Image: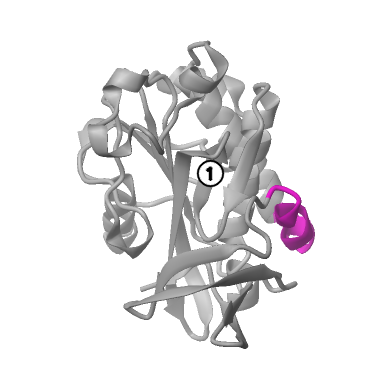
Amino acid sequence: MIFENLIKTNLRTQTYGRVIEYYQIINSTNKEAKALIKNNEANHGMLIISDNQKDGKGRSNNSWFMSPGKGLAMSLIHLKPLSFAKASLIPLAAGLAVAKSLENRGLNPKLKWPNDIFINNKKVGGILCESKIKDGRVDSFIIGIGMNVNESPVDFPDEIKNIATSLFIESGFSFQRELICAIITTYLERMIEDLGSVADLWLTYCNHLNKKVEFKYNNREHTGIFQGINKDGLALVLIDKKIAELPSIIIN
């Protein structure tokens, strides 16, 4: 079980995480966030969190494994309109918030575009940002974060045991999930308040600069060489001898 009061006690934010919707079991925190926005029941900065996410998804609709009561599934709702250029930086800001939070706990995280968090070359978490466009601007967006926190090796399915890890596996210590959630939320609010520095800072955590990346864009599989991030948060990927500028955010 996750205790809302422990999250709020450790928050250092103005709005993010001040309203919490907790679910012991949920299909997807991002789906719940979408429903709350659609029904006009969401607040700016609202945090949706669950002990057991049954249908978590990553980018390109890939499934996300979560061990009930051990992992962290959270989504933050941002309801203040932004330009598309600024919104494109949000997934990078989310990655930085997670990376800095894990550094705060003594770990050495790395980021892989568009949405993966790694420790020692194994995936420990992922980010899924989804947005709505209205009147030429991003009207709202959802920042979904999934993290393996206290899983042991036996918790992972056989097909991902060699590529997945957790904070517990990497450190040898158990973590209070409420504290991890609060630290991520605090860093995230700070990062979004200072989007101008995000692109350059994100690259300092990147683990695949000038290396091959595989991703899905416009419902097609692509392979290219990751060249960096421009000032607007668009990934620069060399595909068929041409540089493509690709967003990290999903627009619905």
Amino acid tagged 1 = Ile
- Residue 71 or 211: which is nearer the viewer? 211
Q: Residue 86: x, y in percent?
A: 65, 70
- Residue drawn at x 68%, y 60% is 209
Q: Main secondary structure of the magenta part?
A: helix
Please, is residue 221 above or below residue 155 in the view?
below
Report x, y in % for residue 87: 58, 68
Residue at the spot x=57%, y=35% of the render?
119
Residue 2 figure quarter: top left
**Relative to 42, is 220 above or below?**
below
**Is 120 placed left or right of 21 in the picture?**
right
Residue nearer the viewer, 73 or 83: 73
Q: Say if the magenta span includes residue 78.
A: no
| Residue under pointer 1 | 117
Rendered location of residue 128, percent (x, y): 43, 55
Quadrant containing the N terminus in the rendered view: top left
Q: Which residues are magenta?
A: 193-205
